[in-house]
Image (cartoon, grey):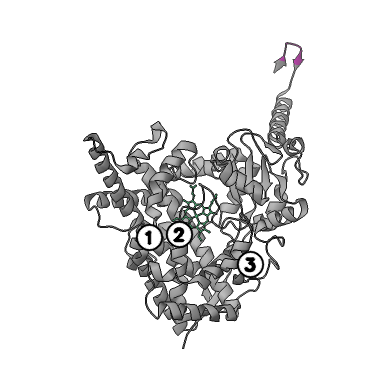
Amino acid sequence: MEVLGLVDIPTWLQWILVLVGLVSAYVISMSWNHGIFKKMGVDGPKPHLIFGNFKMLLKHGVVKTDENMYKKYGKVFGIHETYVPSLFIGDPELIKEILVKKFKSFPNRKNILDDFTDRTMSESMSILKNDRWRFVRGAISPTFSGKKLRQMTHLVNSSVDKLLENIERKVEVDEDIDMKKFVGRFTTDMVASTIFGLDVERQYDKEDSFTRHAQTLFTVDKLGSFVSIIYLARFLAWILLYINRYGKGSIQQKAFRFFLQTTEKAIEERRESLGKYSDFLGILVDSEAKKLEEKHDEAAGVRTEKEDNQTSPKQWTRKKLTDSEIISQALMLMFAGYHTITNQLCFILYHLAIYPDICDKLLQEIDENLNGEVPTYDTVGKLTYLEMCINETMRLFPAANRLTREASNDVTIGNINIPKGLVIHIPAGAIHKDPQYWSEPETFNPERFTPEAKASRIPFVFLPFGDGPRNCIGMRLALLELKIAVGRILQTYRPVKCSKTEVPIKISNLGNIPVGLFLKFEKRN
Ligand code: HEM
């Protein structure tokens, strides 16, 4: 190749120049934003040109890294997750501004994995932004009201019936139980019945399509490697995604197709038999039909109270979700419910096994309040010590170690000027272990959650379900499920350590996910 007719560049040199160009472009793109925290006056570890501060995340995992950084730099610091600058805010006053007071400037999350989500889930509430998120959240919220949860309680109890039968089988042969797998099957069953209304009995059959496909999607073994690829070579992650998406029949694609068809079929059945189903899809389809009726009334000149209070922006006043929006929500709720409940239930049972005194106190509360009866929505509400144990478990092992938001405009909080687009992380896990708010933070002590202790603690230092308008929509369902499951297990059994139980418990580098947790159950006298 001749340049300006002057120099003849041989082919080998052309290749070297292309390579040098590509490497330079890669290095520049990875380090482009590395000066941002210095400009903002925010402290933090010095970033490597390519890896930023990513190596410590790979080495120590998310939980330990956040704790270490919070201890070292205090309540505000910046980390470069390779090319992504992330501002960490751990100050309760500033957290309140982000999650509540200035929510308008932080209405959305920014999760690097969202761009790589399967299309069937791309309209899910946890990913959607701004008005579209408001519209979908507004449409889904009523399905989690107290009245609707009461209707769902029998579905939770049916799943627990099956769990108890399985515990009994293990107790009979005195078997050590791999808790993650064991509890995971129960949770699969529970999401199948509470969201899709599927028959509980089938779920314990390993060949059952729902169980098989759910396990394909729920297994997060390869997630850590994929996240690393996204952070280190985003272009490669896109290539892998397209190969997976358009490659012939990958098992993930088959699983997504299965859930798409299952949800479509379930929606159709519920539209044909209004009022018959008390699962999430049934409740949603019923309320959709009710709204259409209201619209009919409105057309006839009858305005309902709800309509008068309608505050949605004009473009989001349509009466119902599209079918693809409903499908996205169902799948997202399935994921959100599965991982969180499985992990929390494992952690709670683990703590009850290693602290027999606390377990004894809880057994007493359960016996006195449930009187051997199957719990209802109202009776589990009386189990206050159980709620304290659940809260203490979530303090030590929160399902989301960080809450995430994105600044949707330039905004100032405290004396920090945050530029539009910056990722904000609230290190909930690290705050939950800050000795300023929690004495002896590593100790499991449910007494931290007595009404008096709660009242004397400053707000925004306990964030297991997030806070503000974008908090966990499934919080009440989650607590109901956990209380019924733990309450009913303890009516007959107590969890105990076995030879394989490791103390302290091991967690995954990806977050608070128990690894290799073994326990067993003993029958109570
Ligand atoms: C112990 C169990 C659970 C825990 C600890 C938990 C925790 C959380 C947290 C921390 C968030 C982020 C909140 C924020 O950013 O402020 C969240 C969001 C969410 N959770 Fe949960 N969750 C649990 C169970 C569930 C269940 C059972 C469901 C539904 C079936 C659910 C559905 C959701 C959804 C849809 C969001 C996104 C909300 C939005 O963006 O508007 N969660 N959860």
Q: Alpha-carbon neighbours of circle 3 within 10 Å: few (<14), some, or many (≥20)?
A: few
Q: Position of residue 209 (x, y in %)?
A: 36, 59
Q: In the figure, residue 413 lies in which quadrant?
A: top right
Q: Alpha-carbon neighbours of circle 1 within 10 Å: few (<14), some, or many (≥20)?
A: many
| Picture disc at residue 149 | 1
Residue in the image at 39% along x and 77% along y: 165
Majority secondary structure of the magenta segment? loop
> Between disc 1 and disc 2, whose residue precedes?
1
> Between disc 1 and disc 3, whose residue precedes?
1
| Magenta-drawn stretch contains 289 | no
Q: Position of residue 438 (x, y in %)?
A: 68, 64
Q: In the figure, residue 310 lies in which quadrant?
A: top left
Let me know if residue 457 appears in the view: yes
| Picture disc at residue 506 | 3
Which span of residues is magenta-colored?
3-7
Q: In the figure, residue 41 lies in which quadrant?
A: top right
> Between disc 2 and disc 3, whose residue precedes?
2
